[in-house]
Amino acid sequence: AQSVTQLDSHVSVSEGTPVLLRCNYSSSYSPSLFWYVQHPNKGLQLLLKYTSAATLVKGINGFEAEFKKSETSFHLTKPSAHMSDAAEYFCVVSDPESTGGGNKLTFGTGTQLKVEL
Amino acid sequence: GAVVSQHPSRVICKSGTSVKIECRSLDFQATTMFWYRQFPKKSLMLMATSNEGSKATYEQGVEKDKFLINHASLTLSTLTVTSAHPEDSSFYICSALTSGGPNEQFFGPGTRLTVL
């Protein structure tokens, strides 16, 4: 079985300061990992994904995440937060070898990012 | 990226009535679509996998007779909440899976259902 734990339900940062959103996963196989962002009244948007290539993954809008197998972590970072980054962020895992052909996504509980002036 | 739409974006209905929600892939064909439910301040929970031309696969604990799924074409899947009750009030989100290359799910904007 696969699962994802997002350690912080809320994170608040000042504009221009670094962002760190934490995610730990549990998977029986070599997982694919994703970060999605959800803005109010908009669909989920893929920020980045890890699929067993480079462990440091760069995504859109300056976000990146590092896959650390030894720590079973996939934390999301950004060097400098912008007001437009305020949203809900979801860490997501899928197991390519699990039933469902790897397309079944398991979502974390989400982290609400607040960016203050 | 690929675009997925949902209609309606919001719906309010009376208890006991049925509500249909549409999910469309606008610029690609999707043999597989997914339906999720999101409770306030909670994660997305997969309800079912919708396969074009065949029966949907429901997750454990999801009543298939209550949440009817039809995937009649490669660009449209519908979710019908039958005999809705207040506890069915939620945010329903669909996604469509691309094919013919790296598979990726594109999500619709969601439908807010309120049952009075």
Image (cartoon, rainbow, N blue to C red):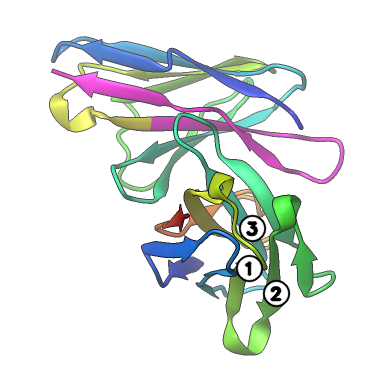
Q: Magenta stretch? A: B92-116
Instruction: Characterize the local packing of mark 2: few (<14), some (14-19) or many (20 or more) Cα atoms within 10 angstroms.
Output: some
- Badge 3: few (under 14), some or many (20 or more) residues near its Cα, within 10 Å? many
Which kind of residue does numbered mark 1 sit on? Thr
Residue depicted at 69% across the width and 18% down the height: B74
Query: Where residue A101 appears, x then y in whole percent?
Result: 67, 52
Question: Which one is nearer the viewer's eye here, A111 or A78?
Answer: A78
Task: Classify residue B64 by image quadrant.
Answer: top left
Q: Nearer the viewer, mark 1 or mark 3?
A: 1
Q: Find disc 2 in the rendering and name its residue.
A: A66
Q: Residue at x 86, y 41 (%)?
A: B101
Q: Point out which mark residue A77 bears.
A: 1
Q: Which residue is mark 3?
A: A34
Dot 1, how many residues are within 10 Å of its Cα: few (below 14), some (14-19), or many (20+)?
some
> Is A57 displayed left or right of A7 in the figure?
right
Q: Is residue B35 magenta?
A: no
